[in-house]
Amino acid sequence: MDNSEILVLCSSQPGFIRFLVPRLVSRCRLMECYTVAEAAQMAQSHQPDLTLLDLRNGDPRKTSRALTIAHNVAATQLLVVCGPNEITSAQIPEEIAYRVTLIPLDEKEDLSHVVSAVDCRLQQLRTAGVTVACGAELSRSTPASPSVPQTAPPAETESDPPSSSIPLSSRFRTQTPDLKRMLDRLEVAARHDVTILLIGETGSGKTHLARLIHEASGRQQRPFVTVACGALPGDLIESELFGHIKGAFTGAHADKDGKFIAAGDGTILLDEIDVLTPDQQVKLLRVIEQGLFEAVGSNQTLKVQARIIAASNLPLEPLVEQQRFRPDLYYRLNTLCFRIPPLRSRLPDIQPLARYFVHLHADRHGIEITHIKDDFYDCLQQYPWPGNVREMENAIRGAVIYCADGHLDSRVLPPNILHGASGPSSDPSVTTFFGGRSGKSLGNRIELTEREIIEQALQNNAYSRTRTARQLGISRVTLYNKMKKYDMMPRRGRDVAADEGGDSP
């Protein structure tokens, strides 16, 4: 069956989406969202054939916003699920009535009726191109369609629309304006065969974004290979990247192809490149500049075919200043550098991401979630997420597993999130997050800002108080007093060696 039609599916209820997605995924191209505002954005961007909105128990303003989609997007037909007598044909403006279909549904009614309604409209689109005749309520005599087993979505075929046709900002699931603008720029770069650098805290989505870049490029049908440089012993990184020949070193009992060979003419992600030694950085620079390398122990020069994406948890500028990262490689990578903000700076994304992870893990674990309470979202918004999206997904997975009655509330979240006890982080904005969210006095806010500046400067200077004071334009005595004031003095035995002058001011 041809499934090139686009359907935007919108509901705030996890159970609704969880039921419909596996039954509709083989019938059309599905795009999920959780609010009418998101549905309106998707409809404007993608001009879907159908927009299915779950407006049960909604207020009149939500209904009005939903009908605006039909006004603004002439290409879409609107299927509106509502409670009995919640919305009537008389409420639908005459000029869009022929493109709006009401599907009244009471709480006890089987959602398979919605599947039948979608099938009916898709059939009309595919065969005679018949428009929906009227805005009247859908007849109960609509023939039921055969049930589709709950399986994973089918693999893409050559006739399927490429996933790259969906904008990166939609696939990265962000509503943050600055990040959306950055992703729009990144999407342009993704289509060209250039090296890209991604900077972002651990768990912020660098690997996921690198895969999206690969899928948005002309190499999407080729391999995507990830190398976690930070997880490899330093003496094995070159062998892992470039391969080795038999006898090149102790334990090299046979020839081995490296990741650059394995990636072929696909894409290779070099994650945590900040851990590479200067000698390894020289070889990487040669790969990026000339596309050439040799396997360890070999004199044969090989040509790289893969597109390179590099990623780092740390900003590279301080590493260059500390002579831990080569300036020539930094300037080569920094040409197309994209920074992913931490989740605590992307507050508009927290609720949509939370809904997505609830749906995902409810489906994976076979748990029925019928309602998400406001205090669940409130608690997520009040936590700084030092582990970013990865930490959030793990927290929501646990919440779903421990949800006993289908109603998610804050009580099922981990205790550290409930009590605001964030885990370790090298970024001072985690510490200042709570003060900024709780409306501290101006004096306290100024102190928090000063503490953040000092802490960041200390990190940039490897905790050397001499260099930190010089960078901040203050004396070492002043820096010492401020560190004592903010309880920033190193514990005994910690970081003393990094400071030329010891612990004395």
Image: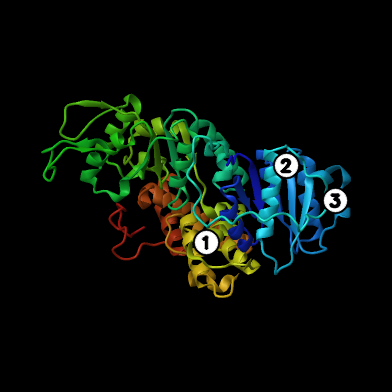
Residue 409, horizontal then vertical, whole percent: 59, 71
Amino acid, disc 1: Asp
Measured in 3D between alpha carbons, the distance from the residue under mark 2 to the one under mark 3, in whole angstroms, is 15 Å
- What residue is disc 1 on? 363
Residue 31, horizontal then vertical, whole percent: 61, 47
Image height check: is 45 above or below 468? Answer: above
Quadrant for the N terminus, please. top right
Image height check: is 215 above or below 401? Answer: above
On the picture, is 134 further left or further right than 458? right
- What residue is disc 2 on? 76
On the picture, is 381 further left or further right than 52? left
Q: Cβ–Cβ below 8 Å for labels 3 and 1?
A: no
Amino acid, disc 2: Thr
- Tell me, yes or no, if residue 22 can be seen here: yes
Q: How many marks?
A: 3
Q: Nearer the viewer, residue 339 or 459?
A: 339
Residue at image position (66%, 61%) is 111
- What residue is disc 3 on? 92
Amino acid, disc 3: Ile
SS class of the residue under badge 3? loop
Q: Nearer the viewer, residue 131 or 450?
A: 131
